[in-house]
Image: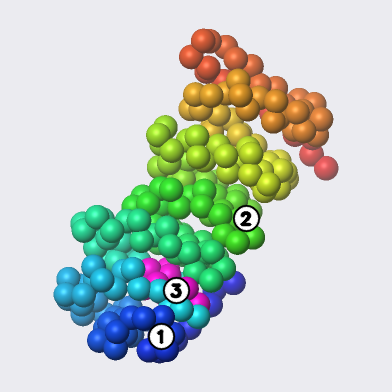
Amino acid sequence: MCRCGDGISEEGTGGINRSLVTQWNELYTEIMKGAKDVIKTRLIKHGKKLMWCQDKQTGRTLLHVAAEAGRVKQIVQFMVDNGLTDAALLGDRDGDTALHLALQCGHLTEARYLIKAAPRTVYQVNHKGISPLYLATKFGRQDLVMYMLQMVGRSLLPACASEIIRHPKNAALAHLAIKARDLGTIIYRFLFFYENLPSIIPSFACLRKLIPSFNILIITPSLTICSNFAPTSK
């Protein structure tokens, strides 16, 4: 659910001084108004400190606010330019990152900005164990799922594998992919690049039981994968 709210109070900042509270709320207001020039000026002046400020009650950052409002482009660019992309990993009181919120609010272009800047957020789970990758799958956004896996890249795939294959939500993600008739995107395309395939093949026993026509074959020593997936239509 998209839940844009108000700015933060001095009591809600958990130690942020009054000056920063004022700056946070002023920038919050400009983000909600979409005042690009003012946002740019305020980011240059105060952004490096403000990007790490979180509301004590909600856990929101300015990036969360921008994600809910569908206006992350300027903030993301500022983060990239100043080496602050790890701020995208901050979760709110529910563990949701800005990427979670962008997807929940249907801001798909904003989601792409966030994914490109901080690919690790793709598989970061909230307090319910739900990742942005799960949300994109649930919403049937095959294009976005493919973009996520593309941006994660080879270096982050082991961690992404843990989310897809080993995390408690993995069964739900796999079943969701099957239901969406999109197993090729979620499983085949992912495994095509995965270097430790032998260690996770046993995890697909449940899928073989559910779908007899789902086959995984190792064709070459380099672990090139061929998948034959023909789900039975209901």
Q: Residue at x 29, y 66 (%)?
A: 75
Q: Residue at x 35, y 56 (%)?
A: 86
Q: Which residue is mark 2?
A: 129
Q: Which residue is mark 3?
A: 60
Is residue 35 inside the magenta stretch?
Answer: no
Q: Which mark is residue 228?
A: none
N-terminal label among 1 and 3: 1
Numbered range of the magenta stretch: 58-67
Is residue 148 among what the camera can see?
yes
Instruction: Indicate the position of residue 90 as horizontal and vertical percent values.
Output: 43, 62
> Please, what is the three-letter code of the amino acid marked with disc 3?
Arg
> Please, what is the three-letter code of the amino acid marked with disc 1?
Ile
Instruction: Indicate the position of residue 51 as horizontal and vertical percent values.
Output: 31, 69
Is residue 65 inside the magenta stretch?
Answer: yes
Q: Relative to 49, say whether 136 is above or below.
A: above
Q: Characterize the magenta stretch by its predominant secondary structure.
A: helix
Instruction: Indicate the position of residue 228 as horizontal and vertical percent values.
Output: 67, 24
Question: Quick check: 71 left or right of 215?
Answer: left
Quadrant containing the N terminus is bottom right
